[in-house]
Amino acid sequence: MKTRMTFILGVLLLADCVTAPTYGVQTIPASDKCFRYEGRFDFADANSPVVIWQASRISIDFEGDTLTLLFDNAKAQNFFNAKIDNSTTIVEVNEGMAAKGTTFMGLGTGRHHLVLSKRSEGNAGSVHFKGIQIDDGAKVWASAPVVYKLKMEFFADSKTAGACNEDGNADQWDNRRTHNGLLSYAAIVSEAFNADHRNISVSGMGIITGYVDVNVGQMWNKIYPKASSPLADLKAWVPDVVFVNLGENDDSFTRKNKKPFPADFNDGYISLVRNIRGAYPKAHIVLLRGGMYGGMHSKELDAAWKYNVEQLEANDKNISHYVLKYQAMNHPRVAEDRKLADELVTWLKQQDFMKAYE
Protein backbone atom coordinates (compact mmCIF):
# COMPACT_ATOMS: atom_id res chain seq x y z
CA MET A 1 0.00 0.00 0.00
CA LYS A 2 1.35 3.41 -0.91
CA THR A 3 2.13 5.69 2.00
CA ARG A 4 1.26 9.36 2.13
CA MET A 5 4.91 10.32 1.94
CA THR A 6 6.79 8.71 -0.88
CA PHE A 7 10.22 7.29 -0.14
CA ILE A 8 12.61 7.55 -3.06
CA LEU A 9 16.10 6.04 -3.13
CA GLY A 10 18.96 5.82 -5.54
CA VAL A 11 19.46 7.42 -8.90
CA LEU A 12 16.95 9.70 -10.56
CA LEU A 13 16.52 9.58 -14.32
CA LEU A 14 19.14 11.51 -16.24
CA ALA A 15 16.75 12.81 -18.88
CA ASP A 16 14.66 15.97 -18.87
CA CYS A 17 17.14 18.10 -16.92
CA VAL A 18 16.00 21.68 -16.55
CA THR A 19 18.25 24.62 -17.40
CA ALA A 20 17.46 27.73 -15.39
CA PRO A 21 16.15 30.77 -17.24
CA THR A 22 18.65 33.35 -18.44
CA TYR A 23 17.27 36.29 -16.47
CA GLY A 24 17.34 37.23 -12.79
CA VAL A 25 18.65 34.93 -10.09
CA GLN A 26 18.89 31.44 -11.45
CA THR A 27 17.49 28.87 -9.09
CA ILE A 28 17.64 25.17 -9.88
CA PRO A 29 14.82 23.64 -7.79
CA ALA A 30 15.34 20.44 -5.85
CA SER A 31 12.86 18.71 -8.15
CA ASP A 32 15.12 19.19 -11.19
CA LYS A 33 15.88 15.81 -12.78
CA CYS A 34 19.58 16.60 -12.87
CA PHE A 35 19.86 16.14 -9.10
CA ARG A 36 20.84 12.63 -8.01
CA TYR A 37 19.58 11.58 -4.57
CA GLU A 38 21.15 8.62 -2.77
CA GLY A 39 19.77 7.68 0.62
CA ARG A 40 16.50 7.47 2.52
CA PHE A 41 14.74 10.80 1.88
CA ASP A 42 11.25 12.16 2.46
CA PHE A 43 9.98 13.13 -0.99
CA ALA A 44 6.43 14.07 -0.06
CA ASP A 45 7.20 17.41 -1.73
CA ALA A 46 9.56 16.96 -4.69
CA ASN A 47 10.44 20.66 -4.56
CA SER A 48 11.47 20.39 -0.90
CA PRO A 49 12.81 16.90 -0.09
CA VAL A 50 13.83 16.33 3.50
CA VAL A 51 17.40 15.18 4.12
CA ILE A 52 17.38 12.91 7.16
CA TRP A 53 19.93 10.13 7.47
CA GLN A 54 23.69 10.29 7.82
CA ALA A 55 25.57 9.46 4.59
CA SER A 56 22.65 10.66 2.43
CA ARG A 57 24.01 12.27 -0.75
CA ILE A 58 22.86 14.81 -3.35
CA SER A 59 24.90 15.45 -6.49
CA ILE A 60 24.74 17.58 -9.62
CA ASP A 61 27.09 19.13 -12.19
CA PHE A 62 26.89 22.85 -12.89
CA GLU A 63 28.83 25.61 -14.57
CA GLY A 64 29.86 29.06 -13.41
CA ASP A 65 31.89 30.88 -10.78
CA THR A 66 29.40 30.79 -7.88
CA LEU A 67 27.02 28.41 -6.13
CA THR A 68 24.60 28.79 -3.23
CA LEU A 69 22.97 25.83 -1.49
CA LEU A 70 19.33 26.42 -0.54
CA PHE A 71 17.75 24.98 2.62
CA ASP A 72 14.59 25.56 4.64
CA ASN A 73 12.77 24.40 7.76
CA ALA A 74 15.76 23.00 9.62
CA LYS A 75 15.01 20.86 12.66
CA ALA A 76 17.70 20.70 15.36
CA GLN A 77 21.27 20.25 14.01
CA ASN A 78 22.39 19.38 10.48
CA PHE A 79 25.95 19.21 9.19
CA PHE A 80 27.06 18.38 5.66
CA ASN A 81 30.22 17.98 3.64
CA ALA A 82 29.89 20.00 0.43
CA LYS A 83 32.49 18.76 -2.03
CA ILE A 84 32.91 20.86 -5.16
CA ASP A 85 35.44 19.33 -7.50
CA ASN A 86 38.36 18.53 -5.13
CA SER A 87 37.53 20.95 -2.31
CA THR A 88 35.36 20.08 0.72
CA THR A 89 33.61 22.54 3.06
CA ILE A 90 31.49 21.82 6.15
CA VAL A 91 27.99 23.26 5.83
CA GLU A 92 25.97 23.99 8.97
CA VAL A 93 22.17 24.31 8.86
CA ASN A 94 20.70 24.48 12.35
CA GLU A 95 17.23 25.34 13.60
CA GLY A 96 16.68 29.01 14.32
CA MET A 97 20.11 30.05 13.03
CA ALA A 98 21.50 31.42 9.79
CA ALA A 99 23.02 28.69 7.62
CA LYS A 100 26.81 28.70 7.42
CA GLY A 101 29.07 27.71 4.54
CA THR A 102 26.34 27.59 1.91
CA THR A 103 27.78 30.10 -0.60
CA PHE A 104 30.80 29.36 -2.79
CA MET A 105 32.58 31.93 -4.93
CA GLY A 106 35.64 31.99 -7.15
CA LEU A 107 34.99 28.52 -8.51
CA GLY A 108 36.13 29.50 -11.99
CA THR A 109 34.43 29.09 -15.30
CA GLY A 110 33.53 25.74 -16.78
CA ARG A 111 31.81 22.65 -15.43
CA HIS A 112 31.92 21.73 -11.72
CA HIS A 113 30.81 18.70 -9.75
CA LEU A 114 28.92 19.00 -6.43
CA VAL A 115 28.37 16.22 -3.89
CA LEU A 116 26.47 17.23 -0.76
CA SER A 117 26.75 14.53 1.95
CA LYS A 118 25.11 14.57 5.38
CA ARG A 119 27.58 14.10 8.24
CA SER A 120 25.26 14.26 11.25
CA GLU A 121 22.81 11.53 12.15
CA GLY A 122 19.11 11.52 11.38
CA ASN A 123 18.01 11.58 15.00
CA ALA A 124 20.01 14.79 15.56
CA GLY A 125 18.14 16.78 12.93
CA SER A 126 16.67 17.05 9.45
CA VAL A 127 16.34 19.82 6.87
CA HIS A 128 14.51 20.55 3.63
CA PHE A 129 16.73 20.87 0.56
CA LYS A 130 15.41 23.49 -1.86
CA GLY A 131 17.99 23.32 -4.66
CA ILE A 132 20.84 25.61 -5.72
CA GLN A 133 21.43 29.07 -7.14
CA ILE A 134 24.02 29.50 -9.87
CA ASP A 135 25.25 32.22 -12.24
CA ASP A 136 22.94 33.87 -14.76
CA GLY A 137 22.76 31.75 -17.90
CA ALA A 138 24.68 28.83 -16.39
CA LYS A 139 23.68 25.25 -17.13
CA VAL A 140 23.31 22.11 -15.06
CA TRP A 141 23.80 18.46 -15.93
CA ALA A 142 23.22 15.15 -14.21
CA SER A 143 26.48 13.89 -12.74
CA ALA A 144 27.96 10.72 -14.16
CA PRO A 145 26.45 7.84 -12.16
CA VAL A 146 28.66 6.17 -9.57
CA VAL A 147 29.23 2.52 -10.43
CA TYR A 148 28.92 0.45 -7.25
CA LYS A 149 29.78 -3.23 -6.87
CA LEU A 150 27.11 -3.90 -4.25
CA LYS A 151 24.77 -2.34 -1.68
CA MET A 152 25.24 -2.43 2.09
CA GLU A 153 22.82 -1.39 4.83
CA PHE A 154 23.58 -0.92 8.54
CA PHE A 155 21.06 -1.06 11.39
CA ALA A 156 22.82 -0.01 14.57
CA ASP A 157 23.38 2.62 17.24
CA SER A 158 25.83 5.44 18.04
CA LYS A 159 29.08 3.60 17.40
CA THR A 160 27.97 2.93 13.83
CA ALA A 161 26.37 6.36 13.30
CA GLY A 162 29.75 8.06 13.79
CA ALA A 163 28.76 9.68 17.08
CA CYS A 164 31.60 11.58 18.80
CA ASN A 165 34.21 10.30 16.35
CA GLU A 166 35.79 13.72 15.86
CA ASP A 167 35.54 14.73 19.54
CA GLY A 168 38.54 15.18 21.84
CA ASN A 169 39.17 12.96 24.84
CA ALA A 170 35.59 13.19 26.13
CA ASP A 171 32.35 12.38 24.30
CA GLN A 172 30.11 15.43 23.83
CA TRP A 173 26.58 15.72 22.47
CA ASP A 174 25.91 19.47 22.39
CA ASN A 175 27.50 20.18 18.99
CA ARG A 176 27.01 17.50 16.33
CA ARG A 177 29.61 19.04 14.01
CA THR A 178 32.10 16.51 15.40
CA HIS A 179 29.78 13.53 14.84
CA ASN A 180 30.77 12.47 11.35
CA GLY A 181 28.89 9.53 9.88
CA LEU A 182 30.91 9.89 6.68
CA LEU A 183 33.91 8.55 8.60
CA SER A 184 32.09 5.89 10.63
CA TYR A 185 33.33 2.32 10.30
CA ALA A 186 30.18 1.65 8.25
CA ALA A 187 31.20 4.25 5.67
CA ILE A 188 34.81 3.05 5.60
CA VAL A 189 33.81 -0.60 5.12
CA SER A 190 31.44 0.38 2.33
CA GLU A 191 34.12 2.41 0.59
CA ALA A 192 36.54 -0.52 0.80
CA PHE A 193 34.12 -2.64 -1.23
CA ASN A 194 32.95 0.19 -3.51
CA ALA A 195 29.48 -0.27 -2.03
CA ASP A 196 26.52 2.08 -2.03
CA HIS A 197 25.39 2.16 1.58
CA ARG A 198 22.63 3.31 3.89
CA ASN A 199 23.36 3.97 7.56
CA ILE A 200 20.10 3.58 9.48
CA SER A 201 21.69 3.98 12.90
CA VAL A 202 20.39 5.96 15.88
CA SER A 203 22.47 6.92 18.92
CA GLY A 204 21.05 5.56 22.16
CA MET A 205 18.68 3.13 20.43
CA GLY A 206 18.22 -0.45 21.54
CA ILE A 207 16.33 -3.56 20.61
CA ILE A 208 13.87 -3.03 23.46
CA THR A 209 15.02 0.02 25.40
CA GLY A 210 17.66 2.73 25.42
CA TYR A 211 18.31 6.44 25.73
CA VAL A 212 15.87 7.57 23.02
CA ASP A 213 12.09 7.25 22.71
CA VAL A 214 12.20 4.76 19.84
CA ASN A 215 13.51 1.21 19.50
CA VAL A 216 14.79 -0.39 16.33
CA GLY A 217 11.66 -2.47 15.75
CA GLN A 218 9.62 0.74 15.54
CA MET A 219 11.77 2.54 12.95
CA TRP A 220 14.09 0.27 10.94
CA ASN A 221 11.70 0.39 7.95
CA LYS A 222 10.56 4.02 8.34
CA ILE A 223 11.49 7.24 6.53
CA TYR A 224 12.27 9.03 9.81
CA PRO A 225 13.77 7.63 13.04
CA LYS A 226 10.35 7.85 14.69
CA ALA A 227 7.71 5.29 15.55
CA SER A 228 5.07 7.56 13.99
CA SER A 229 6.94 7.94 10.69
CA PRO A 230 5.48 6.76 7.38
CA LEU A 231 6.93 3.55 6.02
CA ALA A 232 9.82 3.62 3.61
CA ASP A 233 9.57 1.87 0.26
CA LEU A 234 12.00 -0.96 0.90
CA LYS A 235 11.62 -2.27 -2.66
CA ALA A 236 13.08 0.90 -4.19
CA TRP A 237 16.59 0.15 -2.93
CA VAL A 238 17.49 -3.40 -1.89
CA PRO A 239 20.79 -4.17 -0.10
CA ASP A 240 22.97 -7.16 -0.88
CA VAL A 241 24.47 -7.28 2.62
CA VAL A 242 22.77 -6.11 5.84
CA PHE A 243 24.63 -5.54 9.12
CA VAL A 244 22.93 -5.51 12.54
CA ASN A 245 24.95 -4.26 15.53
CA LEU A 246 22.61 -3.58 18.44
CA GLY A 247 22.12 -4.40 22.10
CA GLU A 248 24.64 -2.27 23.99
CA ASN A 249 22.05 0.37 24.86
CA ASP A 250 19.64 -2.26 26.17
CA ASP A 251 22.40 -3.32 28.53
CA SER A 252 23.83 0.07 29.56
CA PHE A 253 20.48 1.84 29.96
CA THR A 254 19.01 -0.84 32.21
CA ARG A 255 22.25 -1.17 34.15
CA LYS A 256 22.47 2.60 34.66
CA ASN A 257 18.88 2.68 35.93
CA LYS A 258 19.38 -0.39 38.13
CA LYS A 259 16.90 -2.45 36.17
CA PRO A 260 17.26 -6.04 34.94
CA PHE A 261 18.36 -6.76 31.38
CA PRO A 262 15.20 -6.71 29.19
CA ALA A 263 13.37 -10.02 29.49
CA ASP A 264 12.00 -9.69 25.96
CA PHE A 265 15.36 -8.87 24.34
CA ASN A 266 15.64 -12.23 22.56
CA ASP A 267 12.14 -12.03 21.12
CA GLY A 268 12.79 -8.49 19.91
CA TYR A 269 16.16 -9.35 18.35
CA ILE A 270 14.90 -12.42 16.53
CA SER A 271 11.79 -10.59 15.36
CA LEU A 272 13.89 -7.74 13.95
CA VAL A 273 16.17 -10.03 11.97
CA ARG A 274 13.28 -12.08 10.64
CA ASN A 275 11.48 -8.90 9.57
CA ILE A 276 14.62 -7.76 7.77
CA ARG A 277 14.78 -11.15 6.08
CA GLY A 278 11.16 -10.78 5.00
CA ALA A 279 11.91 -7.42 3.43
CA TYR A 280 15.18 -8.54 1.81
CA PRO A 281 14.84 -12.27 1.03
CA LYS A 282 18.07 -12.47 -1.00
CA ALA A 283 20.34 -10.36 1.21
CA HIS A 284 23.07 -11.81 3.38
CA ILE A 285 22.62 -10.68 6.99
CA VAL A 286 25.64 -10.22 9.26
CA LEU A 287 24.99 -10.11 13.01
CA LEU A 288 27.71 -8.00 14.62
CA ARG A 289 28.69 -7.61 18.22
CA GLY A 290 31.19 -5.23 19.75
CA GLY A 291 33.08 -2.05 19.06
CA MET A 292 32.90 -0.57 22.57
CA TYR A 293 34.40 -1.88 25.79
CA GLY A 294 31.33 -1.59 28.00
CA GLY A 295 29.00 -3.70 25.94
CA MET A 296 31.63 -6.34 25.27
CA HIS A 297 31.94 -7.03 29.01
CA SER A 298 28.24 -7.55 29.67
CA LYS A 299 27.58 -11.19 30.50
CA GLU A 300 23.83 -10.74 30.02
CA LEU A 301 24.20 -9.23 26.55
CA ASP A 302 26.81 -11.78 25.54
CA ALA A 303 24.61 -14.71 26.51
CA ALA A 304 21.53 -13.24 24.81
CA TRP A 305 23.39 -12.40 21.61
CA LYS A 306 24.94 -15.88 21.34
CA TYR A 307 21.55 -17.50 21.86
CA ASN A 308 19.96 -15.35 19.17
CA VAL A 309 22.74 -16.02 16.68
CA GLU A 310 22.38 -19.76 17.22
CA GLN A 311 18.61 -19.65 16.73
CA LEU A 312 18.75 -17.48 13.61
CA GLU A 313 21.63 -19.25 11.87
CA ALA A 314 20.04 -22.65 12.46
CA ASN A 315 17.20 -21.77 10.08
CA ASP A 316 18.83 -19.37 7.62
CA LYS A 317 22.01 -20.22 5.70
CA ASN A 318 22.32 -16.58 4.61
CA ILE A 319 22.98 -15.29 8.12
CA SER A 320 26.50 -15.00 9.51
CA HIS A 321 27.97 -13.46 12.64
CA TYR A 322 31.16 -11.71 13.69
CA VAL A 323 32.47 -10.37 17.00
CA LEU A 324 34.66 -7.30 16.65
CA LYS A 325 37.87 -7.70 18.60
CA TYR A 326 38.78 -4.03 18.89
CA GLN A 327 37.06 -2.25 21.78
CA ALA A 328 36.92 1.55 22.11
CA MET A 329 36.76 2.86 25.67
CA ASN A 330 34.50 5.79 24.64
CA HIS A 331 32.67 6.10 21.35
CA PRO A 332 35.11 5.22 18.57
CA ARG A 333 37.15 8.12 17.24
CA VAL A 334 37.98 8.21 13.53
CA ALA A 335 41.25 6.34 14.05
CA GLU A 336 39.31 3.66 15.93
CA ASP A 337 36.60 3.59 13.27
CA ARG A 338 39.39 2.74 10.84
CA LYS A 339 40.60 -0.10 13.08
CA LEU A 340 37.07 -1.50 13.33
CA ALA A 341 36.61 -1.16 9.58
CA ASP A 342 39.94 -2.82 8.77
CA GLU A 343 39.04 -5.73 11.02
CA LEU A 344 35.60 -6.17 9.49
CA VAL A 345 36.91 -5.79 5.93
CA THR A 346 39.52 -8.50 6.56
CA TRP A 347 36.83 -10.87 7.82
CA LEU A 348 34.43 -10.07 4.99
CA LYS A 349 37.07 -10.77 2.35
CA GLN A 350 37.36 -14.29 3.74
CA GLN A 351 33.63 -15.04 3.47
CA ASP A 352 32.14 -16.99 0.58
CA PHE A 353 29.10 -14.73 0.33
CA MET A 354 31.39 -11.82 -0.61
CA LYS A 355 33.14 -13.63 -3.47
CA ALA A 356 30.56 -12.39 -5.99
CA TYR A 357 31.61 -8.78 -5.30
CA GLU A 358 35.37 -9.11 -5.78
Image (spheres, helix red, strand yellow):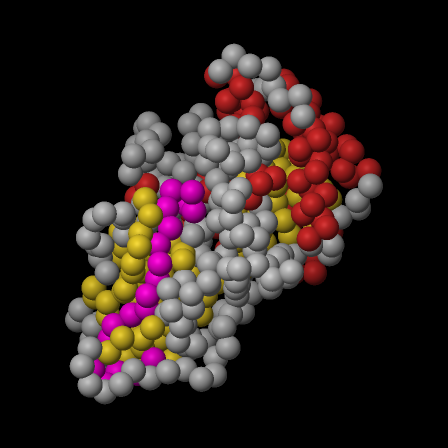
Please check the rendered image and state whether residue 132 is part of the magenta-colored stretch, yes or no: yes
Identify the residue at horizontal 21%, vertical 66% (top origin). Answer: 104
Taking depth in this image into account, of 79 and 171 the one nearest to the observer is: 79
- State which quadrant residue 346 falls in: top right
Q: Position of residue 92 (x, y in %)?
A: 26, 51
Identify the residue at horizontal 28%, vertical 64% (top origin). Answer: 70
Left or right of 11 on screen, residue 356: right
Q: Position of residue 94 (x, y in %)?
A: 27, 48
Give the magenta range. Answer: 121-140
- State which quadrant residue 162 falls in: top left
Taking depth in this image into account, of 61 and 270 the one nearest to the observer is: 270
- Which quadrant of the rendered structure holds the C terminus? bottom right
Left or right of 273 on screen, residue 151: left
Q: Position of residue 132 (x, y in %)?
A: 29, 70
Residue 247 visible within the image: no
- State which quadrant residue 117 falls in: bottom left
Please check the rendered image and state whether residue 13 is part of the magenta-colored stretch, yes or no: no
Q: Position of residue 198 (x, y in %)?
A: 52, 53
Picture layout, residue 92 above or below residue 65:
above
Taking depth in this image into account, of 142 and 43 the one nearest to the observer is: 43
